[in-house]
Amino acid sequence: MRDQAQVVTAQQLSRRLAATAVPAELAELAQSLNDMLSRLEEAFARLSSFSSDIAHELRTPVSNLMTQTQVALSRARSANDYRGILESNAEEFERLARMISDMLLLAKADNGLVLPHRETVHLAKEVRALFDYYEAVADEKGLQLVLGGEADVSADRLMLRRALANLLSNAVRHATPHSSVQVRIDATPDAVYIAIDNTGEAIQPEHLERIFDRFFRVDPSRQRSSEGTGLGLAITRSIVLAHGGSIDASCSEGITTFTIRLPRHDTAA
């Protein structure tokens, strides 16, 4: 077992101890070590993938900034030209700052450092406030924003509003024009459920499994659209988990549904 453990490295995390080749007294220990190696391998793969995604996402805005700056410095330009270039660069800097802020939040969440400040949150009131915010965008697409039900929950109001805003923004963005986006609030003695539905293009099952992954987009062609940093759903999941809840996504007959379950009262994350 010692000899086999010594060959396990960061590059060879797939190696496992031969649990069947050891005495019965050590078989359980060998299996526990193999389970530990499996968890480490999975975490290492996620970290490697996340690092690659970060490099890919940061490369484009940084390249844009460098190119625009080099072009601006290639010859003398008018004040209006410089203003236009600076405005364009400011947009890229804003996107970078938002992405870095989101990644820091996710890093804190991964290490259990996101601690909600609990208070009584009136969910219907928060949803109506978000409806007011997205009303103009919804009107442009002819969407109806529909709310059903109400309930109170013990949660961090600002964090929960951000999670709901991410889901509502996603629903409005992908909803078929002249359809509706529905928010349904249901409560049981132990939990509160918030479901957000929108009618639109169906999401394939293999994509649903990864939809909360960082930087994951169902349509890769939208990588450089104005849809954001690709971290919204990952942040939403982290906020929900920090409240001791859960979130899942489903798609049936063209209707995509995100459902949040939150404990009715304060629960350790």
Image: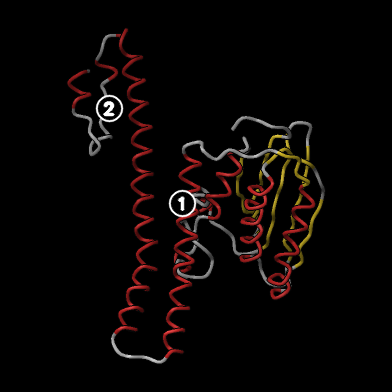
| 142 or 255: nearer the viewer | 142
| 220 or 110: nearer the viewer | 110
Asked if residue 72 is positioned above or below residue 200 in the image, the reply reads below
Name the residue carrying label 1: 103
Question: Do residues under tags 1 and 2 come within 8 Å of each other at their CB atoms?
Answer: no
Q: What residue do we see at 49% from left, 54% from top?
A: 101
Outermost residue to the front: 79
Amino acid at pointer 1: Met
Q: What residue do we see at 33% from left, 90% from top?
A: 76
Q: Quadrant of residue 269?
A: top right
In the rendered image, residue 32, in percent from the top left (x then y), is placed at: 36, 20
Determine the secondary structure under disc 2. Answer: loop
In the rendered image, residue 186, in percent from the top left (x then y), is placed at: 78, 43
Crowding at mark 2 (Cα within 10 Å: few <14, some 14-19, many 20+):
many
Outermost residue to the right: 149
Disc on res. 16: 2
| 180 or 121: nearer the viewer | 121
Asked if residue 23 is positioned above or below residue 32 in the image, the reply reads above
In the rendered image, residue 107, in percent from the top left (x then y), is placed at: 45, 44
Amino acid at pointer 2: Arg
